C-alpha cells in the first residue's frame, strides 16, 4: 500500500474520487428533493427521471467494480525506486568496486611472487571477478526492472487521475443541471454517458499496466535464471598448490 503523501498523483486521484462520491451523493439528494415536490398526477415527468436514476445506479455499480482492484492496492512507486536504488548502490556498485579492486592488474601477487601458488591464484581470480561482475549486472538489471515498474505505475495513476477529474466535472454539471424535474433526465443521461466512457478508459489503463507487469514478470524470471546459473559455490583457490614453501617464490 502507498503511504499518505508518498505519491502526489495517487493522493490527487483519491481526492478526485472522494469529490465524485460527494457530488453523486449530492445529486441523488437533489433529485429526491425535486421529486418530492412533484405530484403523482405528473407521472409522465417522473418516469423519465426514475429510469435515468436507475441507469445511473447501474452504471455507478460498474464504475465501483472497475476501480476496486487498484483502490485497495494502489502500489508504491516511491518504495519501488527506493529498493531499486538499494540494489544499484549496495549490490551493483559495491560488487563492481570489489571486482575492480581484486583484478590481476591491481594485485601485487603476480609482481612479488611466482611459482605454483602464484599461478594457482592467478587462475582463480578471473573466475571470482566474473562472478562479481555477474552480481553487479544482476543488481543493475533488478534496479532497471523496478524503476520501469515505478514509472509504469506513475503513468497509470496519471491517466486514472485524468479520468477521475473528467468524471468529477461531469458530476458537478449534473448537480447544477438538476434544478427541475424537466432538466434532470438530460443531466443524468450525460453523466451516465461520461461514467461509461470513464469505465472504458479505466479498463484500457488497467490493460496497459497489466501488459507492463507481465513484461516485468518475464524480466524477473530471466533474472532468476541468471541467479540460478551463478551456482551456490564461490570459485576457490586450490590450496594444495599453495601449502608448501616451494610453491612460493619471491620475485627478484
Image: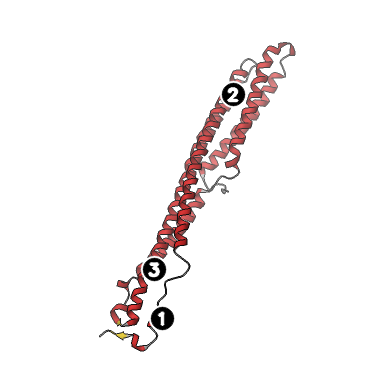
Mark 3 residue crowding within 10 angstroms, few (<14) / some (14–19) / many (20+):
some
Distance from disc 1 to disc 3, alpha carbons, whole Å, reads: 22 Å
Q: Is residue 34 left or right of residue 126?
A: right
Which picture quadrant has residue 105? Answer: bottom left
Mark 2 residue crowding within 10 angstroms, few (<14) / some (14–19) / many (20+):
many
Q: Secondary structure at mark 3?
A: helix
- Tell me where residue 239 appears, x and y as whole percent: 41, 81
Residue found at the far left of this picture = 252
| Mark 3 and mark 2 residues within 8 Å of each other at the beta carbon | no
Distance from disc 3 to disc 2, alpha carbons, whole Å, reads: 65 Å
Is residue 211 shown above or below 81? above
- Tell me where residue 131 appears, x and y as whole percent: 40, 66
Which picture quadrant has residue 238? Answer: bottom left
Residue depicted at 43% across the width and 52% down the height: 144
The residue that label 1 is drawn on is 239
The residue that label 3 is drawn on is 98
Q: Secondary structure at mark 2?
A: helix
Of the numbered discs 3 and 2, the one sitting upstream in the chain is 3
Q: Secondary structure at mark 1?
A: helix
Q: Give the position of the C terminus as an image quadrant.
A: bottom left
| Mark 1 and mark 2 residues within 8 Å of each other at the beta carbon | no
Q: Nearer the viewer, mark 3 or mark 2?
A: 3
- Tell me where residue 169 appears, x and y as whole percent: 54, 28
Residue depicted at 62% across the width and 20% down the height: 178
Distance from disc 1 to disc 2, alpha carbons, whole Å, reads: 83 Å
Q: Is residue 36 left or right of residue 19?
A: right
Of the numbered discs 1 and 3, the one sitting upstream in the chain is 3
Q: Which mark is residue 174?
A: 2
Amino acid at each position: 500500500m502507498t503511504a499518505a503523501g508518498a505519491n502526489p498523483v495517487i493522493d490527487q486521484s483519491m481526492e478526485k474520487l472522494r469529490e465524485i462520491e460527494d457530488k453523486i451523493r449530492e445529486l441523488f439528494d437533489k433529485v429526491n428533493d425535486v421529486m418530492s415536490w412533484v405530484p403523482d398526477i405528473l407521472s409522465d415527468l417522473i418516469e423519465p427521471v426514475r429510469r435515468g436514476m436507475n441507469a445511473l445506479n447501474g452504471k455507478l455499480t460498474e464504475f465501483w467494480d472497475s476501480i476496486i482492484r487498484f483502490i485497495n492496492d494502489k502500489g508504491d512507486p516511491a518504495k519501488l525506486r527506493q529498493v531499486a536504488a538499494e540494489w544499484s548502490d549496495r549490490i551493483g556498485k559495491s560488487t563492481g568496486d570489489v571486482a575492480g579492486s581484486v583484478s590481476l592488474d591491481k594485485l601485487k601477487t603476480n609482481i612479488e611472487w611466482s611459482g605454483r601458488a602464484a599461478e594457482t591464484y592467478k587462475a582463480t581470480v578471473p573466475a571470482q571477478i566474473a562472478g562479481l561482475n555477474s552480481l553487479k549486472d544482476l543488481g543493475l538489471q533488478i534496479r532497471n526492472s523496478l524503476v520501469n515498474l515505478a514509472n509504469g505505475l506513475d503513468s497509470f495513476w496519471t491517466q486514472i487521475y485524468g479520468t477521475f477529474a473528467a468524471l468529477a466535472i461531469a458530476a458537478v454539471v449534473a448537480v447544477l443541471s438538476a434544478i427541475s424535474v424537466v432538466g434532470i433526465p438530460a443531466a443524468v443521461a450525460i453523466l451516465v454517458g461520461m461514467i461509461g466512457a470513464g469505465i472504458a478508459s479505466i479498463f484500457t489503463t488497467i490493460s496497459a499496466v497489466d501488459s507492463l507487469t507481465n513484461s516485468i514478470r518475464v524480466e524477473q524470471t530471466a533474472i532468476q535464471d541468471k541467479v540460478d546459473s551463478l551456482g551456490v559455490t564461490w570459485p576457490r583457490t586450490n590450496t594444495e598448490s599453495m601449502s608448501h614453501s616451494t610453491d612460493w617464490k619471491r620475485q627478484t
